[in-house]
């Protein structure tokens, strides 16, 4: 079976706009978590977020696209343009139906809904339901990418919260195995508006600390919740033969993937993360000893961190593999989080550096080899990315050096 490889990266992240800026900030330990500026959050218990800095849509997109798009769609379109340029692809040069777009989304529809509510209050516009706003966002985010780039191949949107970025890439890999030459995939997400903020707070998982350096501390004894963020990454996936024929630079291969769901609470059955990790490694034809680093989901909630640490230790042994959490510098980006972690994993493979978690003092009770302080030099040939979505979604993906 022909391998699926990654040939392009496009990043819009709270600690860096563009892949190079994101990776440089990540290796330097620069955080993008700060007080919310997109709206007045001072009346809410949670007041911090990871906002994409310095993004001016007019600098990146044609003016005709701006009236019919929201902030998240503009970020996604920009990330898609950058990923295609990085891959050296001009979509119009591809045969009809040879390329598609499969992305993930989770919370971005709130921003459109917020805008409609504001119109209702100020202008008496027609009421738009939450369902309609979500449908609009999902359709526009993927549809605009498809239309803008003339990609008439398979399209779709995966909705599984934080796990979505991996699930979308996996769905794209399935399409490539069926014969599609190229797919734009991943996730760009966020919900930094009053309506979305209240919805996120309902999970009781958001940190209410005011100090950006103490707000999001996964695997730390002082963990108290996560900081939400916006942005993510889109990647170009190709059939390896297609990439080789056109002389493309290859970042790495999507070698293995698996997804599970947790059982109903109170059922007494084990959680599904352990099984997702083992199945993804087996799908890659590897063993746990072949994995050089794990990019953790890192919920920042004590019991969820304990469950993830238990799953990692069960598969790899206590302190058996380096664990990286670059999202301590961005916050949790919902469906954009896992594809950004996958990007970090590919860059780690390229550069032989494992990014460090910032501000975190690892709790010895978790028994993890958590990389903190400064990036750790290492030979990284194979990386595992783990993601969990609200409601019991678990996904794991193995990426490896394509050489």
Image (cartoon, rainbow, N blue to C red):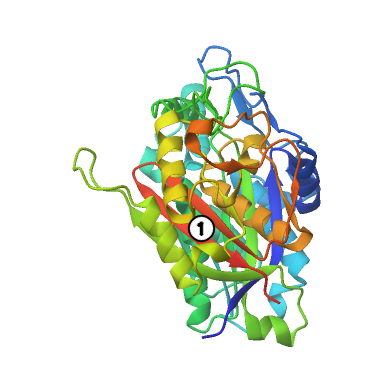
Residue located farthest toward the left when viewing the structure as drawn: 267
Residue shown at 72%/58% (left/top)? 347
Q: 385 or 361, which lies in front?
A: 361
Residue under the point 48% across and 66% down: 281
Quadrant that contains the C terminus: bottom right
Q: Residue 180 at what x, y percent from top left? A: 54, 80
Work out whether residue 246 or residue 217 is closer to the camera in this orientation and state it.
217
Where is residue 176? Give x, y as percent. 53, 78
Closer-to-camera residue (274/41): 274
Location of residue 402 by image quarter: bottom right
Vertical order, 254 against 193 (above or below): below
Q: How many marks?
A: 1
Q: Residue at x 44, y 70 (%)?
A: 282
Residue named by callout 1? 166
Q: Is residue 69 visible?
A: no
Residue 166 % position (x, y): 51, 58
| Above or below for 382 versus 42 | below
Residue 320 versus residue 88 in the image, above or below? above
Give the percent coordinates (x, y) of residue 147. 60, 65
* Element carrying mark 1: helix
Q: Is residue 27 visible?
A: yes
Q: Residues within 10 Å of mark 1 (few under 14, many from 20)?
A: many
Front position in the image: 297 or 139? 297
């Amino acid at each position: 079976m022909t391998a699926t490889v990654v040939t392009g990266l496009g990043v819009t992240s709270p600690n860096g706009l563009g892949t190079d800026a994101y990776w440089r900030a990540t290796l330097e330990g620069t955080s993008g978590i700060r007080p919310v500026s997109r709206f007045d959050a001072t009346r809410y218990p949670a007041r911090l977020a990871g906002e994409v800095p310095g993004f001016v849509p007019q600098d990146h997109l044609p003016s005709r696209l701006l009236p019919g798009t929201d902030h998240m769609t503009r970020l996604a379109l920009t990330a898609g343009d950058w990923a295609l340029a990085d891959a050296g692809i001009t979509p119009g040069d591809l045969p009809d139906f040879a390329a598609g777009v499969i992305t993930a989304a989770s919370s971005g529809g709130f921003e459109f809904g917020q805008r409609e509510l504001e119109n209702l209050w100020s202008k008496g516009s027609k009421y738009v339901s939450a369902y309609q706003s979500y449908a609009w966002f999902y359709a526009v985010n993927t549809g605009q990418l498809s239309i803008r780039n003339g990609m008439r191949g398979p399209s779709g949107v995966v909705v599984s919260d934080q796990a979505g970025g991996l699930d979308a890439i996996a769905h794209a890999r399935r399409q490539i195995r069926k014969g599609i030459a190229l797919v734009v995939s991943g996730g760009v997400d966020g919900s930094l508006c009053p309506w979305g903020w209240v919805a996120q707070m309902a999970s009781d998982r958001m940190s209410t600390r005011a100090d950006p350096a103490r707000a999001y501390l996964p695997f730390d004894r002082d963990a108290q919740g996560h900081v939400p963020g916006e942005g993510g990454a889109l990647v170009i996936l190709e059939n390896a033969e297609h990439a080789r024929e056109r002389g493309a630079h290859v970042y790495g291969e999507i070698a293995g993937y698996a997804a599970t769901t947790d059982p109903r609470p109170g059922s007494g059955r084990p959680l599904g993360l352990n099984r997702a990790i083992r199945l993804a490694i087996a799908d890659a034809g590897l063993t746990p000893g072949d994995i050089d680093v794990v990019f953790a989901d890192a919920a920042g909630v004590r019991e969820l961190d304990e469950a993830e640490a238990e799953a990692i230790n069960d598969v790899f042994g206590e302190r058996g593999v380096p664990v990286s959490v670059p999202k301590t510098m961005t916050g949790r980006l919902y469906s954009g989080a896992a594809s950004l972690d996958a990007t970090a994993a590919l860059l780690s493979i390229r550069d032989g550096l494992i990014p460090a978690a910032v501000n975190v003092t690892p709790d010895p009770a978790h028994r993890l080899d958590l990389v903190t302080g400064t990036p750790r030099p290492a030979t990284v040939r194979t990386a595992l990315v783990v993601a969990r979505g609200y409601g019991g979604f678990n996904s794991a993906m193995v990426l490896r050096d394509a050489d």
